[in-house]
Image (cartoon, helix red, strand yellow):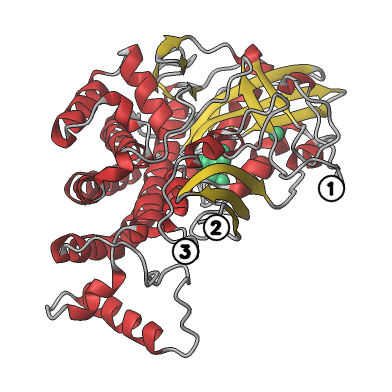
């Protein structure tokens, strides 16, 4: 078969507007381009604004991970104003962020990814009394009858999909698919109780959090996290393992660059020296401490006229929609010139290598034992799903302890004044990976604000040296059985959980 170019546009069941172009030869992807299709301009919007607007404006970058943008922004401001939060403020930030990680990871597995593997039409043969499955059956029947039925619609299956044949696996995962919708709302309730509102939280400010939390609310939050922990343990982790076992070839598909970066997240002390999930860098399997000064962004293949190779503290965002040779609105961040993968897999591998979290180490060891896989095989589609499930358990378990550590009615923030000239760097993790905000203030207003966002790393285009981004590299080698329906490629893309609203910010 002759080599051919396939454009998948849009990629569905992700956030935002992404398309992927792959070259396929002899049934395999030989090269890929990740195309971020919109420009947002948040970094330009922030210029000239009051610094205290930043945590509210940057949350509007995304409705999926607003909490983490708020936290990156207030960490940058904490550093700029020379303040740290009191214990309750630190714990509230952790809990609200944890709630968001949990809802986001459940959303990613069940709503966005699982139906790449699970046969939704298996429910048509269901004869039992479960109301959720009964509802789903009626819905699938009516969709299939509809004259508008289109086999590539986001929810309904592709007719040529190589779906799992096991009826137990299909029906079990579909039952949990419905429950996951409710559990996500429980996670959002937890976030809203301490964040003031959702999706864009009100309570997180420089110096901590404004909510003064009473004993009744703490008790309500504990019962919510207990329900979530139960779902993660009983449904999410077993479902990921069952899908991974039915699709074990996907441990050999989707290997990224093999370099990982994490800023670390969930402060365990006032200064954030210790974090539940640590910062670090893995290049060629070797761990080293993170040095944010080594981060630069290239724009040779991106529609920006700003210079390449700039650190975010001297970075700029000037759109150039007609630029020759460019193919994406995403910049190309690099660490010491290397292409890095960020996200749950990066966090889990870095935490495992650094050995700072015994609970996580035990979970990873249990995962490797249960699946019979090596650490290296986690660099794959299934490795990303498994790492996401593992970290969700670690975060949810710890979140209950943070709730127990809260002091009822204590003040959650440190008062501050804003110097008319200052700068600060806020490094954290969002569900999809390392998130950084770099802020400079002069004359009392923001003079420069640069964000380098998880999907900016993972879905980056080629850099000025021609190195493809992490997802572009992961696509190379993917088998494509049917070029008219390249479902294997979107499984690779979705394993990164891309968010284009964030990537292009
Ligand atoms: Ni819009 Fe986000 C997360 C951030 S990804 S979802 O998680 O920051 O680029
Ligand atoms: Mg940016």
User: In the rendered view, does 368 fall on the left or right side of 217?
Assistant: left
Nearer to us in this view, 160 or 233: 160
Identify the mark nearer the N-term, 3 or 1: 1
Secondary structure type for disc 2: loop
On the image, the x and y values in percent for residue 430 come to 50, 36
Image position of 191 with respect to 313: above or below: below
Nearer to us in this view, 14 or 165: 165
Q: CA distance from mark 3 to mark 2?
A: 12 Å
- Name the residue located 63 percent from the left edge and 23 percent from the top edge: 334
* Image quadrant assignment for residue 139: bottom left
Residue 207 visible in this rendered orientation of the protein: no
Quick one: label 1, few (<14), some, or many (20+) residues within 10 Å?
some
The label shown at residue 11 is: 2
**Residue tagged by mark 1?**
321
- Name the residue located 43 percent from the left edge and 89 percent from the top edge: 146
* Image quadrant assignment for residue 173: bottom left
- Name the residue located 46 percent from the left edge and 9 percent from the top edge: 288
């Amino acid at each position: 078969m002759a080599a051919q170019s396939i454009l998948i546009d849009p990629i569905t069941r992700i956030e935002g507007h992404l398309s992927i172009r792959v070259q396929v030869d002899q049934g395999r992807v030989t090269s890929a381009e990740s195309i971020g299709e919109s420009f947002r301009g948040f970094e330009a919007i922030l210029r000239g604004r009051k610094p205290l607007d930043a945590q509210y404006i940057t949350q509007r970058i995304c409705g999926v991970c607003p909490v983490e943008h708020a936290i990156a922004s207030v960490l940058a401001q904490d550093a700029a104003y020379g303040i740290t939060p009191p214990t309750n403020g630190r714990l509230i930030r952790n809990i609200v962020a944890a709630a968001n990680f949990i809802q986001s990871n459940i959303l990613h597995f069940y709503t966005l990814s699982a139906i790449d593997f699970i046969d939704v039409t298996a429910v048509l043969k269901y004869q039992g009394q479960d109301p959720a499955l009964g509802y789903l059956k009626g819905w699938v029947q009516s969709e299939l009858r509809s004259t508008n039925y289109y086999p590539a619609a986001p929810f309904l299956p592709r007719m040529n999909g190589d779906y799992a044949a096991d009826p137990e696996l299909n029906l079990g995962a579909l039952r949990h698919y419905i429950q996951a919708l409710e559990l996500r709302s429980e996670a959002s309730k937890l976030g809203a109780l301490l964040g003031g509102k959702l999706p864009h939280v009100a309570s997180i400010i420089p110096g901590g959090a404004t909510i003064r939390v009473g004993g009744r609310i703490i008790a309500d939050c504990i019962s919510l996290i207990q329900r979530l922990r139960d779902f993660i343990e009983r449904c999410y982790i077993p479902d990921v393992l069952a899908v991974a076992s039915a699709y074990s070839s996907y441990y050999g598909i989707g290997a990224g660059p093999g370099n990982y970066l994490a800023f670390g997240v969930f402060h365990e002390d006032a200064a954030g020296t210790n974090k539940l999930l640590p910062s670090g860098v893995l290049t060629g399997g070797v761990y080293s401490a993170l040095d944010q000064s080594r981060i630069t962004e290239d724009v040779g293949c991106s529609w920006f006229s700003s210079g390449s190779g700039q650190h975010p503290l001297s970075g700029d965002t000037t759109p150039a929609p007609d630029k020759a040779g460019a193919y994406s609105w995403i910049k190309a961040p690099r660490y010491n010139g290397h292409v890095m993968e960020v996200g749950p897999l990066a966090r889990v591998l870095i935490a495992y290598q650094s050995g700072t979290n015994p609970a996580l180490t035990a979970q990873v060891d249990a995962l490797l034992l249960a699946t019979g896989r090596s650490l290296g095989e986690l660099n794959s589609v299934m490795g990303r799903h498994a790492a996401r499930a593992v970290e969700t358990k670690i975060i949810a378990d710890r979140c209950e302890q943070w709730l127990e550590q809260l002091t009822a009615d204590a003040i959650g923030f440190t008062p501050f004044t804003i110097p008319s000239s200052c700068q600060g760097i806020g490094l954290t993790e969002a569900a999809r990976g390392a998130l950084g905000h770099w802020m400079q203030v002069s004359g009392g207003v923001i003079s420069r604000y640069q964000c380098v966002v998880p999907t900016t790393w993972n879905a980056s285009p080629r850099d000025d040296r021609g190195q493809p981004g992490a997802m572009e590299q992961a696509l190379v080698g993917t088998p494509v059985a049917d070029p008219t329906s390249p479902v294997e490629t979107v499984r690779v893309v979705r394993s990164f959980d891309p968010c284009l609203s964030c990537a292009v910010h």
